[in-house]
Amino acid sequence: MAESVEQRAYHGTLAPGDLAKALVVRFDSGETQAHWMAAEAGRAVVQIQSRQMEHRDPTTAVTVHISPTKTGITVSVSEQQVLSVAADMAKTGVEAWLNPLRLLGEIDDIARNVRWLGLRAEVWKAVDEYCRNQGSGRGAAGVLLHVTCPYCGTPNDIGAQNCKACYAPLAAVQPIVCGRCGFLNEPEASLCVNCGAAL
């Protein structure tokens, strides 16, 4: 079965390594651990996983891929594997049904499992907050305000047919607007990086 990967694009002055470091600072403590490594072409990969607080604790993890684009970064987060966490919660439920007093000793485990089930959502929240604090916006129509002339480097309004400085044609550098979500994609994109729709 193919792994589900959610991908979002952010426009602005963002560096993959800086976001990776921020994620490690946020998640490498307490009940989670995180580490990152630089990858080819300026990309960064961050692994975030639950920390085993007790011997029989289940584990869950997500992998974050951060890639530079011409207008900012693209962030992809892998599907979280939650089977062992869900199984541990089910086991605790059965044990509590057989012996309700046992539930009192399992409160910390239940709280950890609930947090771990939401790890992927917590990672996305951290990414959104970091990018927003850097003054960068998530991919949406209107966030990308200019295209750069490939001949003279002058910024031009999106939709301009010719460069305002050298009058060169700009059709090849215009973003492709996704018909489904309105995201402005790179000119060579075949799939929308925000929602995955074919362009």
Image (cartoon, rainbow, N blue to C red):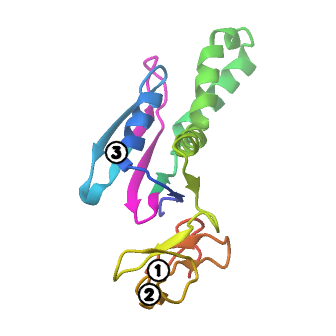
Query: In this rendering, is residue 142 above or below 168?
Result: above
Q: Secondary structure at mark 2?
A: helix
Q: Position of residue 153 (x, y in %)?
A: 37, 75
- The alpha-carbon separation of the residues under discs 2 and 3 comes to 30 Å
Mark on residue 172? 2
Q: Position of residue 27 (x, y in %)?
A: 46, 30
Is residue 35 or residue 91 the one in the foreground? 35
Identify residue type, mark 2.
Answer: Ala
Query: In this rendering, is residue 64 above or below 33?
Result: below
Mark on residue 187? 1
Left or right, residue 56 beside residue 82: left
Is residue 140 or residue 147 the one in the foreground? 147
Marks 3/1 in contact by CB < 8 Å: the verdict is: no
| Circle nearer the N terminus (3, 1) | 3
Q: Secondary structure at mark 3?
A: helix
Q: Position of residue 32 (x, y in %)?
A: 46, 27
Marks 1/2 in contact by CB < 8 Å: the verdict is: yes
| Circle nearer the N terminus (2, 3) | 3
| Circle nearer the N terminus (1, 2) | 2
Residue located beneath label 3 in the image: 17
Instruction: Classify mark 3: residues with Cα within 10 Å, few (<14), some (14-19) or many (20+).
Output: many
Q: Residue at x 56, y 45 (%)?
A: 124
Quarter of the image holding residue 158?
bottom right
Q: Residue at x 37, y 49 (%)?
A: 16
| 67 falls in the magenta region | yes
| 54 falls in the magenta region | yes
Mark on residue 124? none
Q: Which residues are magenta?
A: 47-73
Query: In this rendering, is residue 52 above or below 198?
Result: above
Q: Position of residue 141 (x, y in %)?
A: 64, 68
- The alpha-carbon separation of the residues under discs 3 and 1 comes to 25 Å
- The alpha-carbon separation of the residues under discs 1 and 2 comes to 7 Å
